[in-house]
Amino acid sequence: MKNTECFVQRTGQRTRLPPLLRTGRSPMLQYNSNSKQLSLDDDVSADEYKASALEANVRQINRLTQALVAESNPNFTPQPTQEATNMIKKMFEAAMQHLQKQRPQDALRGVDLALDMRSKARHPWEAFAFQLQELQMMLRNKTDLELATGRLMDALQDLEMLQGCGMIVADVFVRTADVLLKMSRYEEAKAAAERGLSLEPDHMKLKALHLESVRKLADYNGDI
């Protein structure tokens, strides 16, 4: 297996892409110098699992390349787009106003719209740390609204996403243990509380959730 490297030429800059794997003499990826886009070789589609994984990577590379090619300033430093930041902020603040008026369903819809706006308005080359912080803040508020409106499965999925985004803090495990208890998933709730307590051993809410999950698990198993 021999490695090759693909480069995209744009306004004097070269954007380095990952090495392209070769199988025998046939490359797995094809590069169109006119569109500056990558595509999978026809042979790859025969392996469904491999094709699915590669297609996801190719889509990400093509999205980044398209954004870079469209950038008119050849010497730009990636920064959050102020226009997008303002739009997302206004949409999120409007959602929080619904919450102040005791309209949690409308607030939840507003946060969903703000998250959707964020995914569409942000360029892939913008500073990742800022995007991550923005996403974590909105997801954290969204999970609270989902818990308040009884959308437990949605809340659990978003809490898992928060953990996947690197937000490993006690408050996330408080919410996770709470939603798992409400779903009668006592063993998982106990594990979530224990993970949170490993971060903050004296966290009173986590201690209470842990005791509750242990008690309900014992009751479920017929031990008490």
Image (tube, rainbow, N blue to C red):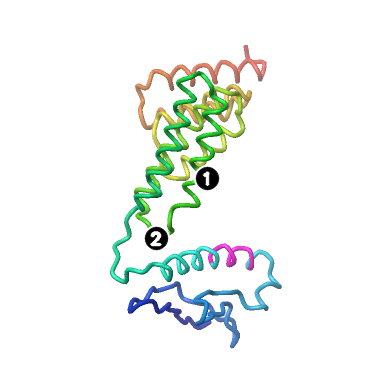
Secondary structure state at the residue bearing disc 2: loop
Which quadrant would the C terminus be assigned to in this image? Answer: top right
Distance from the alpha carbon under mark 2 to that under mark 1:
18 Å
To which residue does mark 1 refer?
116
Measured as percent of width and height from the top left, residue 70 is found at: 43, 68
Q: Residues within 10 Å of mark 1 (few under 14, many from 20)?
A: few
Measured as percent of width and height from the top left, residue 96 is found at: 45, 28
To which residue does mark 2 refer?
125
5 sits left or right of 105 in the view:
left
Q: Is residue 4 magenta?
A: no
> Of 93 and 1, which appears nearest the observer?
93
Q: Residue at x 37, y 56 (%)?
A: 126
Amino acid at dot 1: Asp
> Of 150 and 53, which appears nearest the observer?
150
Q: Nearer the viewer, mark 2 or mark 1?
A: 1
Q: Residue at x 57, y 30 (%)?
A: 188
As drawn, which residue projects farthest toward the bottom? Answer: 25
Is 30 rendered above or below residue 145? below
Q: Main secondary structure of the magenta part?
A: helix
Amino acid at dot 2: Trp
- Sequence-wise, the earlier of marks 2 and 1 is 1
Q: Which residues are magenta?
A: 51-57
Measured as percent of width and height from the top left, residue 211 is found at: 49, 17
Residue 221, picture quadrant: top right
> Of 193 and 117, which appears nearest the observer?
117
> Of 182 and 202, which appears nearest the observer?
182
Q: Which mark is residue 1?
A: none
Secondary structure state at the residue bearing disc 1: helix
